[in-house]
Amino acid sequence: MRRPIVAGNWKMHGTRADNARLIEALLAGHPDRALAECLVFPPFVYLQDVGRLVRDTPIELGAQNVCAEARGAFTGEVSASMLQDVGCRYVLVGHSERRWIYHEDDQLVARKFAAAQAKSLVPILCVGEHLWDRENGRTEEVVARQLDVVLELCGVGALESGVIAYEPMWAIGTGRTATPEQAQAVHAFIRERIAKRDAKMGESTRVLYGGSVKASNAAELFAQPDVDGGLIGGASLNAEEFLAILAACGLR
Ligand code: 13P
């Protein structure tokens, strides 16, 4: 049985006061650990602050990015051990905004995945195609390439403590969600791709969907057999929406 995850990627939003209000409202809604793991990914500068607010609560902490190097002269970067040190358990790697805006390539993303695991963080590997890839029938090719580079570098066994998030780039922040059928098809493809290397790992790896998930569409997405929860952007900044998305896990 794969335990669902509902993760809020706050991206570059919020202030200390906003964060405190958001966490307070989330906790007031009693997020149910039994329904899903509930994670938040604040910007780096707020990790410690938010970490304090969620300590000993059902909400867990993650970071939006990590440096592939362990330490050294890498101005502006943050290492996996630093994230560990401030209480993170999870980290996003290869978010499409990192790949597309900051030119992170598959190799770098794979090295970040490895760097995170080396410090016992659970990496959430984001994969997903551009609209033009989809329109040219290349969705599976793109997703397979993004996934395979990580499996080559880290080995399929690394998924024992890793998570995949399928986030079609045309659905991120656009209000245009993949249909449940579109999401399910790619999730099943990802699972099969993993299963080709290790059947058990194909079955047990959690694959989240991200891209314009809201309270109004979460239940139908999460009802798909290979969708194990969501990575939520915009809607995670609103406690009521985020709690409703979490509750949608209970309807699976
Ligand atoms: P939106 O939910 O705002 O589309 O963002 C999705 C995302 O990029 C989560 O990582």
Image (cartoon, rainbow, N blue to C red):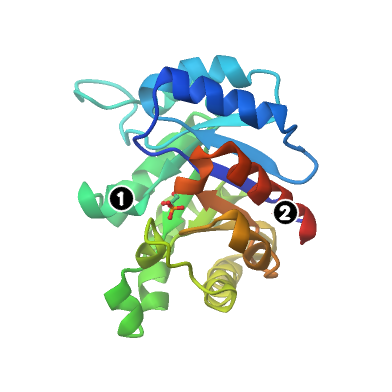
Do the CB atoms of the residues marked 1 and 2 lie less than 8 Å apart?
no
Residue 156: image tag:
none
Give the class, few, some or many, for how many residues have Cα within 10 Å of label 1's Cα (few <14, many ≥20): few
* Residue at image point 37% right, 37% down: 65
Q: Which mark is residue 249?
A: 2
Q: Which quarter of the figure has residue 239?
A: top right
Mark closer to the observer (1, 2): 2
Total numbered badges shown on the rendered structure: 2
In front of the other: 250 or 155: 250
Q: Amino acid at mark 1?
A: Glu
Q: Position of residue 95 (x, y in %)?
A: 37, 50
Secondary structure of the residue carrying numbered label 1 = helix
Residue at 50 percent across and 56 percent down: it is 165
Q: Is mark 1 within 8 Å of ligand 1?
A: yes
- Asked whether residue 125 appears in the rendered view, the answer is yes
Q: Secondary structure at mark 2?
A: helix
Q: Going 45% across and 47% down the picture, which residue do you hit? A: 234
The vertical placement of 153 against 116, above or below, is below
Residue 161 seen anywhere in this rendered image of the structure? no
Instruction: Report the disc number at residue 97.
Output: 1
Seen at 69% across and 58% down, the residue is 204
- Kindly indicate the quadrant of the structure image that contains residue 242: top right
Q: As drawn, is 166 to the left or to the right of 3?
A: left
Q: Position of residue 23 (x, y in %)?
A: 58, 26
